[in-house]
Image (spheres, grey):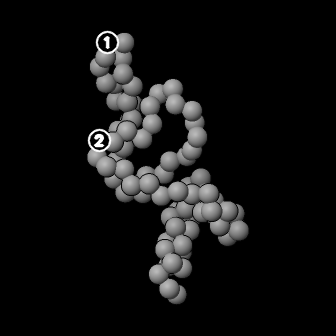
Amino acid sequence: MDAKEYIMAVIIDIISSIPLFSGLPDDQLQAIKQISLEKLVNKGETIFTEGDDGKGFFVVIDGRVKIYKVSAEGKEQILH
């Protein structure tokens, strides 16, 4: 197995470990992999904001994400 095949196998393993996708047949996991994009996000970087069009599905593989809403007074209210 070369490096590219190894990386593809790791991506399939990650996708299949997500509860929403676990149990899917290999051809469907491959289809999800084909439309998947890997994105490295730096600490403090915004991924999306309230009101943005829902154009994707995010899976956090490593690290943490702060989900919050800004109150009318301008304070962050952490949701999760």
SS state under label 1: loop
The span from disc 1 to disc 2 (Cα, nearest Å) is 22 Å
Residue 12 percent location from the top left of the image:
56, 68
Residue 44, labelled with which disc? Answer: 2
Q: Residue at x 39, y 55 (%)?
A: 40
Which is more toward the observer, 45 or 26? 45
Q: Position of residue 36 (x, y in %)?
A: 57, 57
Q: In this rendering, would 51 be left or right of 44? A: right
Which quadrant holds residue 22? Answer: bottom right
Residue 23 seen in the current view? no
Counting from the top left corner in percent of width and height, residue 28 is at 69, 63
**Relative to 9, does residue 59 appear above or below in the rendering?**
above
Mark sitting earlier along the chain (1/2)? 2
> Where residue 45 sits in the image (x, y, percent)?
33, 42
Residue at image location 33% in from the left, 53% down from the top: 63
The residue that appears at 54% across and 73% down in the rendered structure is 8
Circle 1 residue: 73
